[in-house]
């Protein structure tokens, strides 16, 4: 039996691409790149910011029948910023968050991940979240990685990863 790809291994590829784009070189700005595991262990006030959080957001079925499926794996990248600005002052948070969102988009749009057949494509993200008290703002971006599956051939063009 042919081993099946680990489709959620894409998380590591997204984290690595973000590390290269945001934590290296003269334009480095990101203090932390975390995943859902990290978010489960840290209180908001203890977060390093600006930060990025990579979270798997579920499966999208584009079309399927008894023999094949065209699947999408939806990933969120949340830009977290912290400011001492007053809670009603959105401009400082939006200024910072907007610059970082652009950097994430440049780093990930079109990125081909292990076990997928197409590069990451942006899709509509959830709404931003502003924490009570106004210190933190979270700006999500959403991307879909596509994979094709058939009963006869398995995952088409997929790289087998652990």
Image: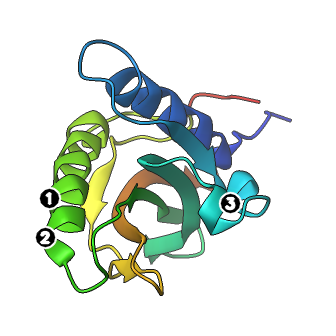
Q: Is residue 24 left or right of residue 89?
A: right
Q: Position of residue 57 (x, y in %)?
A: 55, 69
| Residue located beneath label 3 in the image | 39
Q: Position of residue 53 (x, y in %)?
A: 52, 53
Q: Position of residue 112 (x, y in %)?
A: 38, 33
Q: Nearer the viewer, residue 89 or 142?
A: 89
Q: Is residue 91 visible?
A: yes
- Marks 3 & 1, CB-CB < 8 Å contact: no
Where residue 92 sits, quadrant-wise, is bottom left
Q: Nearer the viewer, residue 162 or 103?
A: 103
Q: Is residue 161 left or right of residue 50?
A: right
| Residue located beneath label 2 in the image | 91
- Marks 2 & 1, CB-CB < 8 Å contact: yes
| Residue located beneath label 1 in the image | 95
Secondary structure at badge 1 equals: helix
Mark 2 Cα-neighbour bin, 10 Å: few <14, some 14–19, many ≥20: few
How many numbered circles does the render carry? 3
User: Is the N terminus in the top left, top right, bottom left or bottom right quadrant?
Assistant: top right
> Is 54 situated above or below 45?
above
Label 2 or label 3, whichever lies nearer to me, is: 2
Q: Is residue 157 visible?
A: no
Mark 2 or mark 3: whose residue is earlier in sequence = 3
Q: Residue furthest top?
A: 25
């Amino acid at each position: 039996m042919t081993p099946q790809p680990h489709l959620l291994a894409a998380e590591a590829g997204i984290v690595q691409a973000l590390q290269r784009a945001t934590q290296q070189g003269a334009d480095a700005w990101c203090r932390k790149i975390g995943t859902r595991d990290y978010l489960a262990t840290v209180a908001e006030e203890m977060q390093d910011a600006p930060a990025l959080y990579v979270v798997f957001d579920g499966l999208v079925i584009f079309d399927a029948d008894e023999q094949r499926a065209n699947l999408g794996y939806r990933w969120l990248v949340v830009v977290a910023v912290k400011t001492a600005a007053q809670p009603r002052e959105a401009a400082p948070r939006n200024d910072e968050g907007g610059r970082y969102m652009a950097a994430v988009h440049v780093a990930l749009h079109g990125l081909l991940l292990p076990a997928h057949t197409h590069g990451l494509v942006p899709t509509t993200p959830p709404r931003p979240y502003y924490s009570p008290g106004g210190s933190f703002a979270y700006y999500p971006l959403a991307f879909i990685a596509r994979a094709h599956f058939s009963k006869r051939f398995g995952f088409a063009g997929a790289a087998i990863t652990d």
